[in-house]
Image (spheres, rainbow, N blue to C red):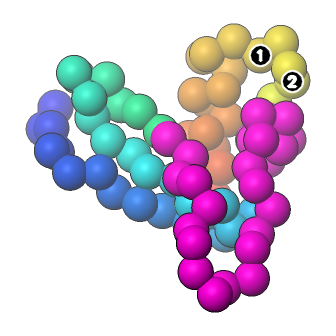
């Protein structure tokens, strides 16, 4: 699998939260970006419960369930 050194930033169309994706040490990582300091109106901060709600997984969901939900939502948007 090709590895990219730079991170790629995306914005969720539903909650408008920004997140970065990158390969670090051979592992695909998704990191929520801190709120930008600008004159734009502030968006709701993404929290773990909100992220799970957006993905449609329970609090007790394991990694495989979260990954499956992530792929489903990513294809949807």
Left or right of residue 16: residue 33? left
Q: Secondary structure at mark 1?
A: loop
Q: Which residue is mark 2?
A: 58
Q: Which residue is mark 1?
A: 61
Q: Is residue 2 magenta?
A: no
For label 1, the crowd category at 10 Å Cα-Cα, with few meaning under 14, some 14 to 19 and many 20 or more, is: few
Q: Quadrant of residue 67?
A: top right
Residue shown at 58% from the left, 80% from the top: 38
For label 2, the crowd category at 10 Å Cα-Cα, with few meaning under 14, some 14 to 19 and many 20 or more, is: few
Magenta residues, as a range? 31-55
Residues 19 and 73: in front is 19
Q: Quadrant of the N terminus?
A: top left
Picture coordinates of residue 54, whole percent (x, y): 79, 47
Magenta: main secondary structure: loop
Contact? badges 2 and 1 (CB < 8 Å): yes
**One can see residue 14 in this view:** no
Q: Quadrant of the C terminus?
A: bottom right
Picture coordinates of residue 70, whole percent (x, y): 61, 39
Residue shown at 33% from the left, 57% from the top: 8
Residue shown at 61% from the left, 16% from the top: 63
Q: Quadrant of residue 15?
A: bottom right
Picture coordinates of residue 24, whole percent (x, y): 26, 29
**One can see residue 67 in this view:** yes
Left or right of residue 45: residue 1? left
Residue shown at 31% from the left, 23% from the top: 27
Residues 18 and 63: in front is 18
Left or right of residue 1: residue 23? right
The CA span between labels 2 and 1 is 5 Å
């Amino acid at each position: 699998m090709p590895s990219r050194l730079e991170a790629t930033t995306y914005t969720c169309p539903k909650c408008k939260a920004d997140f970065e994706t990158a390969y670090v040490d051979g592992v695909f990582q998704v990191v929520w970006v801190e709120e930008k300091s600008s004159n734009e109106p502030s968006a709701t901060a993404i929290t773990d419960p909100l992220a799970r709600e957006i993905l449609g997984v329970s609090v007790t969901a394991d990694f495989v369930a979260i990954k499956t939900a992530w792929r489903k939502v990513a294809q949807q948007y």
